[in-house]
Amino acid sequence: MKKIDRRKFLKVTGVAAGTAALASACAPKKVKNTGENGEMEYRINTNNGDKVSLLGYGCMRWKMIKDADGKEIIDQESVNELVDYAIEHGVNYFDTSPVYLQGQSETATGIALARHPRESYFLATKLSNFGIYTKEQSLKMYYDSFKELHTDYFDYYLLHSIGRGGDHAFNERYVDNGILDFLLEERKAGRIRNLGFSFHGNQENFDYLLGLHEKYHWDFIQIEMNYIDWRHADGVRNVNAEYLYEKIAALDIPIIIMEPLLGGRLASLPDNIADKLKEREPQKSLASWAFRFVGSYPKVLCILSGMTYRSDLEDNVDTFTNFKPLTGEEKDFLEHMAIMYSQYPIVNCTNCKYCMPCPWGIDIPGIFKHYNTCINEGIFAGSRDESDYARNKRKYLTSYNKAIPTVRQADHCIFCRKCLPACPQSINIPRELKRIDDYIEKLKQDTL
């Protein structure tokens, strides 16, 4: 990393004193960097030599609890335990954002990571300036991230969720206000070691952004990739990952993967698909198939997973310890599973919660998650002619009322459309809520 005036920078950001005190107060046990039964899989960033764990920690799904006032806050004790376990077992890449978990993710992630030596992990965060176009506001977000994460440099820094809105939106957020020029200077100074972007959009938008590589020299690019989106993206809201991967790989740009499980949906598949995977690997999780698929591509530097619970982390560590890439025949098998999956009427929600909080209190991701889960588990009444119609109707309505409080259900949507600009999947959220609410009303009225 290039030399910088570290003392001056620490004075500006106010990082030093708090970090030292926090680290000495609650330092965890020594890092092993291995799994219990072998070595974590690592990839080398050929541009700078970084040895990055193939499994990365996406810090968007930390466990939430309620405080004494009933406010949702991150369970810091849980975060600390998960981070300790991850680092102890070789995970060294952590990805967060100022907007994750209602703005709490960087704080919780920073507290947990500051208890470990800074050189023991790679830290990624983002300039999530959605709707914030002035340089002053963007700079405040940038400098606040240093304070929250107790650091004086970022290993990987992203322009967050670009692509939607084309070149106009990109220029408005980063170019016209001079913020991208500023970030390029920060990269020269070493406070940003790698500068890249996370992409959500159509092929035209992607081609435009990739075409800027000659001008900006992207150090890495983060894309959505899984065995469904590999060849079965809708082409409007997102692009086939096969196309994205091959275009980026041709330029020898390291690739970070998000949504390898499609927001968890590939870990909870429809029964007829899950059964076929279990027949082949009865001792392995459904999620392991998805991770092995993505990790089988050599230009992938790191695969992010938002692991809320210890059991998920342990399972993923097991998958990436003594990692086993898919064979050609196994890739063909998953392609067949992807074709089957694409026939289900799923809402393409990844549970990122960017749409929250809804100004009218609607639990948007919760409604979509319940709907998708019911389809996957076969709790879906297609028509009154079906033999199991009454059972599925009862189960759907009962589980819906248990999962989603009445005041937060889909029928409260007033089509204010404030959620639309926030969705990285470009879901027409009000329309999907209306569709689900119509389905529920037809169940109640027996008019299917």
Image (cartoon, rainbow, N blue to C red):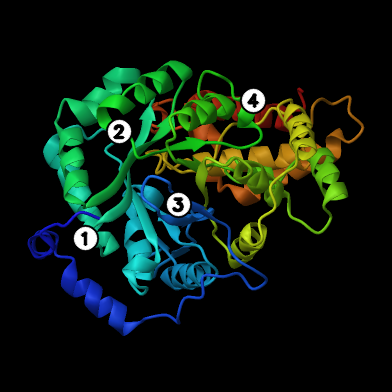
Give above or below for 72 relative to 290.
below
Amino acid found under the numbered disc labelled 4: Arg
Which residue is more in the foreground, 414 or 343?
343
Nearest to viewer (mark 4 / mark 2): 2
Mark 2 or 3: the one toward you: 2
| Quadrant holding the C terminus | top right
* C-alpha distance separating marks 2 and 1: 23 Å
Please tell me how crowded label 4 is: few (under 14), some (14-19), or many (20+) other residues with Cα within 10 Å. some
**Which percent across, then down, holds residue 54?**
54, 53
In the visual, does 15 lie left or right of 405?
A: left
Find residue 350 and report its image quarter: top right
Residue mark closest to the camera, 1 vs 3: 1
- Asked if marks 2 and 3 touch (Cβ < 8 Å), the reply is no
**Is 340 or 252 nearer to us in this picture?**
252
| Contact check, label 2 and label 1, Cβ < 8 Å | no
Three-letter code, disc 3 = Met
Residue 283 visible (yes or no): yes
Q: Disc 4 designates what residue?
A: 231
Q: Which residue is mark 1?
A: 152
Seen in the picture, residue 44 relative to 356 is either above or below; the reply is below
440 sits to left or right of 332: left
Cα distance between the residues tagged 4 and 3: 26 Å
Residue 261 in the image: state x and y as whole percent.
Answer: 61, 44
Q: Nearer the viewer, mark 2 or mark 1?
A: 2
Q: Residues within 10 Å of mark 2 (few under 14, many from 20)?
A: some
Circle nearer the N terminus (2, 3): 3
Of helix, strand and loop, which one carries label 1? Answer: loop
Farthest right residue? 387
Q: How much space separates mark 1 and mark 4, taking CA atoms?
A: 40 Å
- Which residue in the structure is indicated by mark 2? 217
Question: Which residue is the site of mark 3?
Answer: 60
The amino acid type found where label 2 is placed reads His
